[in-house]
Image (spheres, rainbow, N blue to C red):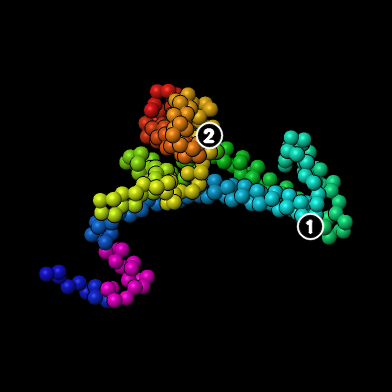
Amino acid sequence: MTPFVKGRHKEGRTKRDPIDCRKLARSLRNGEIEGIYVPCRPKLEDRSLIRTRQSMVRKQTRCKNQIKGMLLFYGVGIPEKGEMGHWSRRFIQWIERIRMERASGDIALKVHLEELSHLRQLIASLNRAILRLARTEEYGPLVRLLKTVPGISTLTAMILLTELGEITRFPSLDELSCYVGLIPDTQESGEKEYVGSITQRRHSQLRWLLIEASWVAIRKDPALLMAFEEYCKRMRKTKAIVKIARKLLNRIRYVLKNQAEYVPCVIQ
């Protein structure tokens, strides 16, 4: 017979935040669940710096799209990318020379250009701050190790270090891949198991970052290129690159766990 616990009957009849908190606290005290990983305050502040840069880059992209959209709306033809390069200094100077039919249109376009200039200055300032952080004693050695992995730049290394935290908290590659979101979506019912496409549960920034880095890695690492070509024989390139991203993640995990440089064509 289950012993009576004060408040259990009430917990079964109602659901409120205070009741849920007590149930979680009791389960944690009894060892039924484990606490989540919480980075220390300095790590969180370093992560905030990286995420702020990413936020500013998204705002810059939106601002560029607004400028192009405004020009196309008023029938202003945009030169081909090869002529002067989109968003180069020449391209922005060309936009600045455009005159609308009324002063109100000129002011609207000028405000967008001023916003773009301000965002560029902020991103440049954040880039310098991230580079300084990457050279510190805390991050410098790990950044140098990660940059030996094909496709990993200084910025990519800093994103990985601040988002993953302690690599030892992932006992296996499967758990790390699950955290990033580089595993298939599976559904199981009785004896039937369905394996679908890539899971929707993910760390969106890390998964996107690793897939983008994998496109660079296959051009630099012969082993990854060979694996990519083999995958492409039986699946689309967009699916093959996800499998390469998992291999790249395995190399990153090896470097961080063993504090050793990556040697191409040796680590599989």
Q: Quadrant of residue 28?
A: bottom left
- Residue at mark 1: 108
**Residues packed near mark 1 inside 10 Å, few (<14), some (14 to 19) or many (20 plus):** few
The relative height of residue 231 versus residue 25 in the rendered view (above or below) is: above
Q: Kindly identify the residue that appears in the image at 78 percent across and 38 percent down.
A: 90
Instruction: Inspect the image, locate mark 1, and give the three-letter code of the amino acid beneath it.
Output: Ala
Tell me, yes or no, whether the highlighted magenta stretch contains residue 161.
no
Tell me, yes or no, whether the highlighted magenta stretch contains residue 19.
yes
136 or 5, which is in the foreground? 5
Tally of numbered discs: 2
SS at mark 2 in the image: helix
Q: Quadrant of the C terminus?
A: top left
Instruction: Inspect the image, locate mark 2, and give the three-letter code of the amino acid beneath it.
Output: Trp
Residue 134 in view? no
* Most common SS among magenta residues: helix
Q: Kindly identify the residue that appears in the image at 50 percent across and 29 percent down.
A: 218
Relative horizontal placement of residue 200, taking residue 135 as reference (left or right)? left
Q: In the image, which residues are magenta?
A: 11-26
> Looking at the picture, how far across and down is residue 254, in whole percent?
38, 32
SS at mark 1 in the image: helix
Label number found at residue 215: 2
